Image (cartoon, coloured by chain):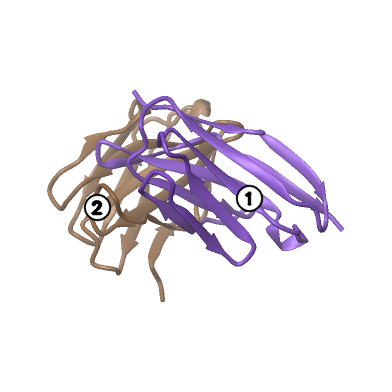
Chain colours: A purple, B brown
């Protein structure tokens, strides 16, 4: 079965710093999703990537699916306290969505 | 915009008790899902329903049953709750399975003592 591994598991950065979260799949990715979750709340959809080499941006968050389609990275530029939360990558697995274990991000003012 | 609504938001159960988590979506989506979230383990799929009238097991189905009551509603039942089922449960829906954005409810916090 397909598995998703996220790294790092947790991250503490100073406000204004850039950061990257990685999501590595044990199998080829046919649709990679990034979600954000604030503590005590549901998941908010950030973006979906489907093609190898595809890159999408939303405000200061950029995600890319590598050419070999087994890894995705999420990059935040000039982090802000509003970026704090848990970031989860998800992938299509025979029609259903599976998730990595999540990366907890703290941004210190 | 209601989206995906799940109830109850909080529940404490005693070991052996049963309960049903309710979920409804108003987006006319075909597919619905139940996940559980535990610290350090991300979201794990319990059951899903690709379309009305069908249900399938996910990664961690043991101890749970589901009912796709109609296109809008998908319930999750714990017949005999165990402490290992203490978790946060999320219901979700999508237009169909595969290649579609999934929309999540706000979660139900369940504690089994």
Residue B44 visible in the shown view = yes
User: Within the image, what quadrant is residue B5 found in?
Assistant: bottom left
Of badges 1 and 2, the one in the foreground is 1
Residue shown at the point (87%, 58%) measured from the top left: A109
Answer with left or right where residue A44 lies relative to residue A76: left
Residue B108 visible in the shown view = no
Residue closest to the eye, A62 or B70: A62
Q: Quadrant of the N terminus of chain B?
A: bottom left
- The picture places residue B77, in percent across and down from the top left corner, at 33, 41
- The picture places residue B19, in percent across and down from the top left corner, at 39, 43
Residue shown at the point (63%, 55%) measured from the top left: A38
- The picture places residue A45, in percent across and down from the top left corner, at 48, 58
- The circle on residue B22 is none
- The circle on residue B31 is 2
Answer with left or right where residue B103 lies relative to residue B113: left
Decide: is A39 above or below B47.
below
Residue shown at the point (51%, 39%) measured from the top left: B37
Marks 1 and 2 sit apart, C-alpha to C-alpha, by 30 Å
User: Within the image, what quadrant is residue B54 found in?
Assistant: top left
Answer with left or right where residue B40 lies relative to residue B34: right
Q: Which residue is mark 1?
A: A75
Residue shown at the point (19%, 54%) measured from the top left: B69
Secondary element type, mark 2: strand
Q: Residue furthest bottom?
A: B1
Q: Report the number of discs.
A: 2
């Amino acid at each position: 079965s397909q598995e998703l591994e996220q790294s790092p598991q947790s991250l503490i950065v100073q406000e204004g710093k850039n950061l990257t979260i990685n999501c590595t799949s044990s199998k080829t990715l046919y649709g990679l999703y990034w979600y954000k979750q604030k503590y005590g709340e549901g998941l908010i959809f950030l973006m979906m990537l489907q093609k190898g080499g595809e890159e999408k941006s939303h405000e200061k968050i950029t995600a890319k699916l590598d050419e070999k389609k087994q890894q995705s990275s999420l990059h935040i530029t000039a982090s802000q306290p509003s970026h704090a939360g848990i970031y989860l990558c998800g992938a299509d697995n025979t029609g259903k969505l599976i998730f990595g274990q999540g990366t907890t991000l703290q941004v210190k003012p | 915009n209601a989206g995906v609504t799940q109830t109850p938001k909080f529940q404490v159960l005693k070991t052996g008790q049963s309960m049903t988590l309710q979920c409804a979506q108003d987006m006319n989506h075909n597919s619905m899902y139940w996940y559980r979230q535990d610290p350090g383990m991300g979201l794990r799929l319990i059951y899903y329903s690709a379309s009305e009238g069908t249900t399938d097991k996910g990664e961690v189905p043991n101890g749970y049953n589901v009912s796709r009551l109609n296109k809008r509603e998908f319930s999750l039942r714990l017949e005999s709750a165990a402490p290992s089922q203490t978790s946060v449960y999320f219901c979700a829906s999508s237009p169909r399975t595969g290649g579609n954005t999934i929309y999540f409810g706000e979660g139900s916090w369940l504690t089994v003592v």
